Structure formats: structure tokens, C-alpha cells
């Protein structure tokens, strides 16, 4: 089993900053930083046992480091290796990458799901009364200009009243999409999900950088749009710096205006290495700016997932909804849940979180 140089550097940095107390702790350090996909777990365990376990005494069981965010936990609250899933957020890296990622063509099943999503978004997004008034048959506000014009035609008699109303318009949708290595296998479908969003949607990607991809996703055709995103995003499949990326978004006045009154959707596993304070602070400000703040995580698709790690536990109080999205099908399910999220009281439902897939 060969690990990428960036993963090797991450492993060495981890053991240099916090020396593992025993073989069990060393195992988790290596697994979290070196393992890219759960399919390589058997080979990883064999190599680790050959080098560190055979001939040694049984090491005491030590929990994995607190900084491993987005863990899948069993019913007892302990971290479960059996419940791990591909792309389950078991690794995070601070290593920055350069260069784009190529996405494959969309197949027929994906295109069918995208058609359903295009219909689902407008039907489920929250609305707000528009600023401009329009003529209406009934209402609470008289259209005095039209009333007086009609009265002049009727010899000065107020024979018919005219009304105006403020028709509803869809709130702006803001999508902040994690493209780091821990979401590598989900990134193509998550970008397709963002592509299906309606007009006036703003989309940003983040890993170790923040990139606005709204214009790239506006291309005609999903595959040309994904190719444009590939050219624009240079930190795909790299490290994670959620707090720094969200802070950069909030520091830009033009970007800040996009979040005001919007439905803000963050798609990320919440896997932040190190101190999550910046991520929690930025999430809190996004929550205050937006109409609602929704967080979709591939990890939350697992029935055993609980947001008990420091990063997700910190941001949970700022969220109006925490849902599971890992592909187009789960994305459609969460889009259809938006009316229930936006109709209820803010953040009250997540004083005690339960997985929607339980």
C-alpha cells in the first residue's frame, strides 16, 4: 500500500506535533492521515501489523485523537471501525494542492436525477415578498393612481377600486461546497447538485482556498460546466481549511452581501484539523446573516453518525438543519425537506440532533 507524498507529510507532521502514547494511538494517527479510501483498510492493517504489532505486547486501547472530526460512532458512543464508509471523513490534511481535477461525463441515471432536482429546487426554496408592487384583483393596498384614472373616466365617481400586491419571489440560494480530499468520491455529484440550482444561486468551493464558481456552473450543459469548474478550482482533493475559507468569504463585502437574507447551504463533512474556533465563529456569523443555515454532510447519511466531535459540536448550535447528502438521490431528499426547515423556529430542532436516516 503506497500513500501519496502529501499524506506521508501529513502523517509525519502529526506525530511530530503530538507524539503517540502507544501503538494503538500510532495506529489511529497513521490511519487518519495515510488512508484515503476504506477499501484499502485491509492492506493498511496488514502492513501496520507487520511493522508494529507482531511480537509486541497488546497495547492499551486509546481513543483516536480529538481532532479527527466527522467520526462515525457506534451506539455506545465509541468510534466504530466497522461502520466506516468510503469517503467518510477519516482523514484531513492541511497540505495545499495545485492543478485541476477532471470529472467524467454524466451518465443517463445522473441526468434523470438532475431533471428531478431542477424541478424540486424552485418548488421547495423559501420565498419573500418582492419589493416592487404589481396590480392585483384583491389586496390590502389601494393602487391610487389607477383608482383616480378610472374615476376620471367615470365622471369623478369612485366606482371601482384597484389594488396592488407584492408577489412572492424566491430567496437567494448560497451554496458553499467542500472539495477537499475527504469528499473526493462525492465531489462530482455534489457539483452536479449545485449545477441544478435555479437562477440567482451563488456557488463557492473551498478546500484550502475559496473559489467562486457561479459563472463556471452557468455554462450550457453539465459536462462543459464541470470542465469549467475543473479549470477554476485548483485546490480540489487537497487539504481542508474550513474556518479560513469561510472567514475569507465573510471578509469580502461583495460576498458578504450574497449571504444576507439567503438560504445558506454548506456541503461539507466538517472535518477541520486543529483548532475549530475559526470555523465555529464563521458559521455563527453566516447563521446571523442568512435566512436559514443548512449543513449537508456525507457522514450524516450513516445512521450511526453523531456530531459529537469538536468542530461539528461547536457549529451545531448555529445550524437550522443538519442533513445527509452524498449523491444526487440524497440531495433530492434533502431539497424536498427544505420547506419544513424554513417554516419552523430557528435552530430549535437541533438542541438535540437525531439522524434523519434513523
Image: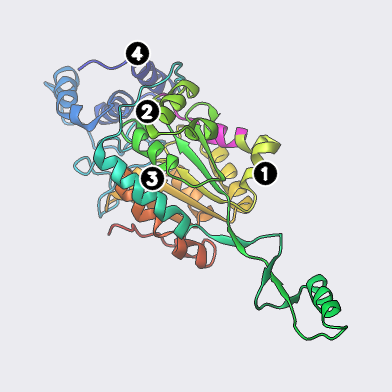
Viewer-closest of 163 and 334:
163
Pointer 4: what residue?
A: 5
Instruction: Give whichever of discs 4 and 1 has the lower sequence position.
Output: 4
Q: Name the magenta segment's main secondary structure.
A: helix
Q: Identify the mark nearer the N-term, 3 or 1.
A: 1
Judge whether 85 appears above or below 330 on screen.
Answer: above
Q: Quadrant of the C terminus?
A: bottom left
71 relative position to 54: left or right: right
Q: Which residue is mark 1?
A: 257
Image location of residue 84, percent across then percent down:
24, 40
Tell me which label, 2 or 1, sits earlier in the chain.
Answer: 2
Q: Does the magenta portion include 245?
A: yes
> Start and end of the magenta stretch?
238-248
Callout 4 touching callout 1 (CB < 8 Å): no
Q: CA distance from mark 3 to mark 4?
A: 27 Å
Residue that badge 3 annotates = 297
Q: State the quadrant of the N terminus.
A: top left
The residue mark sitting in front, 4 or 2, is 2
Mark 1 neighbour class, 10 Å CA radius: few under 14, some 14 to 19, many 20 or more: few
Amino acid at each position: 500500500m503506497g500513500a501519496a507524498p502529501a499524506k506521508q507529510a501529513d502523517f509525519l507532521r502529526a506525530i511530530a506535533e503530538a507524539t503517540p502514547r502507544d501503538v494503538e494511538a500510532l495506529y489511529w494517527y497513521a490511519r487518519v492521515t495515510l488512508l484515503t479510501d476504506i477499501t484499502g483498510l485491509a492492506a493498511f492493517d496488514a502492513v501496520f501489523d507487520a511493522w508494529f504489532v507482531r511480537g509486541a505486547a497488546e497495547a492499551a486501547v486509546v481513543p483516536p485523537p480529538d481532532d479527527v472530526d466527522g467520526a462515525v460512532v457506534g451506539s455506545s458512543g465509541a468510534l466504530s471501525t466497522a461502520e466506516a464508509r468510503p469517503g467518510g471523513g477519516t482523514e484531513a490534511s492541511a497540505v495545499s494542492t495545485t492543478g485541476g481535477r477532471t470529472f467524467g461525463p454524466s451518465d443517463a441515471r445522473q441526468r434523470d436525477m438532475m431533471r428531478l432536482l431542477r424541478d424540486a429546487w424552485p418548488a421547495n426554496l423559501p420565498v419573500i415578498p418582492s419589493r416592487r408592487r404589481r396590480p392585483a384583483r384583491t389586496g390590502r393596498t389601494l393602487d391610487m393612481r389607477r383608482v383616480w384614472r378610472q374615476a376620471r373616466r367615470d365622471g369623478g365617481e369612485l366606482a371601482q377600486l384597484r389594488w396592488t400586491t407584492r408577489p412572492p419571489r424566491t430567496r437567494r440560494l448560497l451554496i458553499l461546497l467542500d472539495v477537499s480530499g475527504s469528499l473526493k468520491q462525492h465531489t462530482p455529484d455534489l457539483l452536479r447538485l449545485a449545477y441544478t440550482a435555479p437562477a440567482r444561486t451563488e456557488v463557492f468551493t473551498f478546500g484550502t482556498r475559496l473559489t467562486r464558481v457561479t459563472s463556471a456552473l452557468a455554462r450550457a450543459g453539465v459536462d462543459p460546466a464541470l470542465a469549467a469548474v475543473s479549470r477554476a478550482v485548483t485546490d480540489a482533493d487537497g487539504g481542508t481549511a474550513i474556518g479560513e475559507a469561510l472567514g475569507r468569504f465573510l471578509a469580502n463585502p461583495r460576498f458578504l452581501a450574497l449571504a444576507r437574507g439567503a438560504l445558506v447551504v454548506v456541503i461539507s463533512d466538517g472535518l477541520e484539523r486543529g483548532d475549530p474556533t475559526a470555523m465555529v465563529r464563521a458559521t455563527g456569523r453566516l447563521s446571523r446573516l442568512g435566512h436559514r443555515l443548512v449543513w449537508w454532510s456525507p457522514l450524516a447519511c450513516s445512521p450511526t453518525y453523531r456530531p459529537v466531535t469538536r468542530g461539528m459540536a461547536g457549529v451545531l448550535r448555529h445550524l437550522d438543519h443538519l442533513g445527509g447528502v452524498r449523491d444526487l438521490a440524497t440531495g433530492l431528499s434533502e431539497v424536498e425537506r427544505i420547506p419544513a426547515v424554513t417554516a419552523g423556529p430557528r435552530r430549535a430542532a437541533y438542541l438535540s440532533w437525531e439522524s434523519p436516516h434513523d
